[in-house]
Image: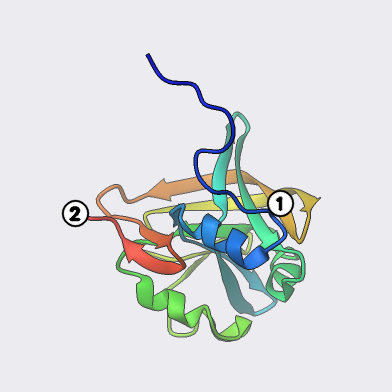
Amino acid sequence: MAETRTGHPAASSPTTDPTQLRRAFALVPSGVAAVCAQVGTTATGMLVSSCTSVSLDPAMLSICIQSSSRTWASLRTSGEVGVSFLSDSQDRLCARFAGAGPERLAGTDIVVTDQGAVLVPDAVAWFTCSIRDEIPAGDHVIVLLGIESYGTRPGLSPLIFHRSAFTRLPR
């Protein structure tokens, strides 16, 4: 029989220190997704590590974006966005996303759909999505995306963001 205790399992910290809270979040691994679209004549995008399934019927994903993101302000004007979960062979591409918005996809093979979604080939999974809703949430916005189509490459392994670094799953 399990022993029942009260209180916290270990020392806990108040949420008033964002640096410590960020370190706590970094302990939980997540996939890395490139959210991209054609804006005017330029393909641009951003990386997100807060991307998760929401619903099967209707098919939906959610992403969390910092409210002050200029890239999201631009991407949201596109008809659709592409969400590409990067494979573990695409870690160099992540370094390019640290640069300015228009240059992030320079030199990268991409696929642009008729509706303006930009997809990154060799991703583990990709989704073309329409923006359904944006919900303010503190210093971020939760974006609900309706999945219009998707594809997968089950033989590939995902790139993981863990402990504030890009890493691979052990094979």
Front residue of 80/114: it is: 80
Is 46 located above or below residue 169 in the figure?
below
- Residue 5's x, y, as percent? 52, 26
Which one is nearer the viewer's eye here, 104 or 27? 27
Q: In what element is the residue under mark 2?
A: loop
- Give the farthest residue toward the top: 1
Q: Is residue 151 above or below residue 65?
A: above
Q: Quadrant of residue 21?
A: bottom right
What residue is drawn where x is 59% and y is 71%? 45
Q: Is residue 148 above or below residue 170?
A: above
Q: Residue at x 59, y 34 (%)?
A: 7
Secondary structure found at label 1: strand
Q: Amino acid at mark 1?
A: Ile
Q: 91 or 101: nearer the eye? A: 91
Which residue does the image show at 39% across and 68% down from the upper left?
A: 166
In the picture as drawn, the residue positioned furthest to the left comes out as 171
> Which amino acid, mark 2?
Arg
Label drawn at residue 171: 2
Residue bearing mark 1: 142
Mark 2 or mark 1: which comes first in sequence?
1
